[in-house]
Image (cartoon, rainbow, N blue to C red):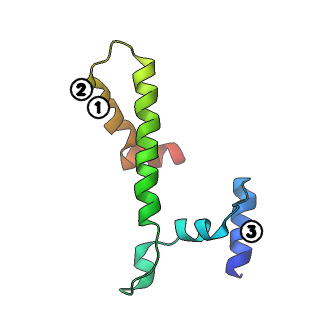
């Protein structure tokens, strides 16, 4: 199956059409794919996504419990955005 066909199938399954299909390709390209050669991979998008997720969760925690102090919110944030919690939510 061609790369284009895979991209179209993935977009159909997600119910989302990328305006810039290159972003989809980039998001799906792990650094190890380059096999030691420098390639464009998803690390910059991962960095941005981690920060966006953290901001959204921080805002929800801040608004949800008006009495929570910074330490409590930090512990909750870390528990919610850690890799295992995100993997569980994705299932």
Tell me what residue is drawn at x 46 percent, y 52 percent. Answer: 49
Q: For label 3, count other residues whose C-alpha is less than 10 Å away and answer few (under 14), some (14-19) or many (20+).
A: some
Q: Secondary structure at mark 1?
A: helix
Residue 68, image x and y in percent?
32, 17
Residue 48, image x and y in percent?
44, 54
Tell me what residue is drawn at x 74 percent, y 53 percent. Answer: 15
| 74 is higher (above) or lower (below) than 21 | above
Foreground: 54 or 75?
A: 54
Please name the residue that numbered disc 1 is placed on. 74
Pointers 1 and 2 in contact (C-beta within 8 Å): yes
| 68 is higher (above) or lower (below) than 7 | above
Please name the residue that numbered disc 2 is placed on. 71
Gap in angstroms between the C-alphas marked 1 and 2: 5 Å
| 43 is higher (above) or lower (below) than 63 | below
Q: Secondary structure at mark 2?
A: helix
Q: For label 1, count other residues whose C-alpha is less than 10 Å away and answer few (under 14), some (14-19) or many (20+).
A: some
> Residue 8, labelled with which disc?
3
């Amino acid at each position: 199956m061609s790369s284009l066909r895979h991209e179209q199938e993935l977009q159909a399954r997600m119910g989302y059409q990328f305006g810039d299909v290159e972003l989809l390709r980039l998001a799906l390209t792990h650094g190890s794919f380059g096999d030691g050669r420098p390639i464009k991979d998803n690390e910059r998008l991962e960095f941005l996504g981690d920060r966006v997720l953290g901001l959204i969760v921080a805002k929800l925690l801040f608004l949800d419990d008006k009495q929570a102090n910074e330490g409590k919110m930090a512990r909750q944030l870390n528990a919610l955005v850690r890799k295992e919690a995100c993997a569980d939510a994705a299932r």
